[in-house]
Amino acid sequence: MSKAARERSARERLAAERKRQEARDKQRKLLAIVLGAVVAVAAVVVVTVIVLDQRGKSDQKATAYTGPQAPLTRDADGSIVMAKAGVTAPTIEIFEDFQCPACKSFEESTGKKVKELAAAGKVKVVYRPFHLFGQSQNPIKENSLRSAAAALCVPADKWLSYHDALFKFQPEEGDEGFATKELVNWGKDVGVADAGFEKCVTDQQKKSQVDTMTTYALQTRKVTGTPTVFLNGRKLEDNELGSPDGLEKAVSDAAKTKTNQ
């Protein structure tokens, strides 16, 4: 190959390489633009999600329960009793954890019927909240403890409203929730005016009582999951818990049994 031919070939290779380099540069620039756009969109999405999440939390305002119910009192052990004067049986005991999704489902499906039966004088109801998830990982463990301790800070006459709010605003499994500020605000929303309420919630002053109630549930009553509901000491089956009619029939049968004894 002549010198001129070699030079021409070299120029052609150089020109070809420059074209390839230019093409690669264009691809990199295009990729940078695309990636920049993706990052920008992702940032907008993240900001939007955060804003909506915060807006959703700010909209979580609890409301006072105004439906049927019987008078509420608190026993020395922290449990809440709902019953008309003189009604001592049949007795429903509800062991629940405010972080428990199944408990929320029970409240949504059958909670109203529980209140109606008590208001009609057909049953005595004992609510026994406790800390089921004490051995679980966070955040579910702390969610469970904070909500149970806060509920024990609420006066008996406001407790049912607060109880319902905790289930209404129950965080998703795996999400951190029941923040101290929220727990305090929900109490104020439903009319808790006690001067010591906020400090009680903030300092978890009822933690030791929650621990005692948890020991009673797990060790004395052998509760292994929630919700666990006893009727005159008998653990109710899922078909009795899952529907208002099933629960009402169980209560009616228990009342007949007591009458016939």
Image (cartoon, rainbow, N blue to C red):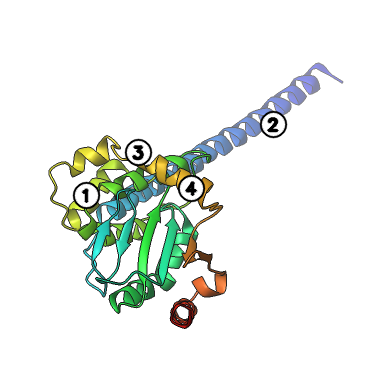
Q: Is residue 205 left or right of residue 218?
A: left
Q: Residue at x 42, y 62 (%)?
A: 93
Query: Is label 3 or label 2 in front?
Result: 3
Sequence-earlier tag: 3 or 4: 4
Disc 1 residue type (three-letter)? Asn
Q: Is residue 87 left or right of residue 21?
A: left
Disc 3 residue type (three-letter)? Lys
Sequence-earlier tag: 4 or 2: 2
Using the image, tell me which numbered label, if any, was put on residue 207. Answer: 3
Q: Residue at x 43, y 51 (%)?
A: 99
Sequence-earlier tag: 3 or 2: 2
Q: Which residue is mark 4?
A: 132
Q: Secondary structure at mark 1?
A: helix
Disc 4 residue type (three-letter)? Leu
Mark 1–mark 4 Cα distance, whole angstroms, equals 24 Å
13 or 88: which is nearer to us? 88
Mark 3–mark 2 Cα distance, whole angstroms, equals 77 Å
Query: Is label 4 or label 2 in front?
Result: 4
174 or 131: which is nearer to us? 131
Mark 1–mark 2 Cα distance, whole angstroms, equals 71 Å
Q: Which residue is mark 2?
A: 16
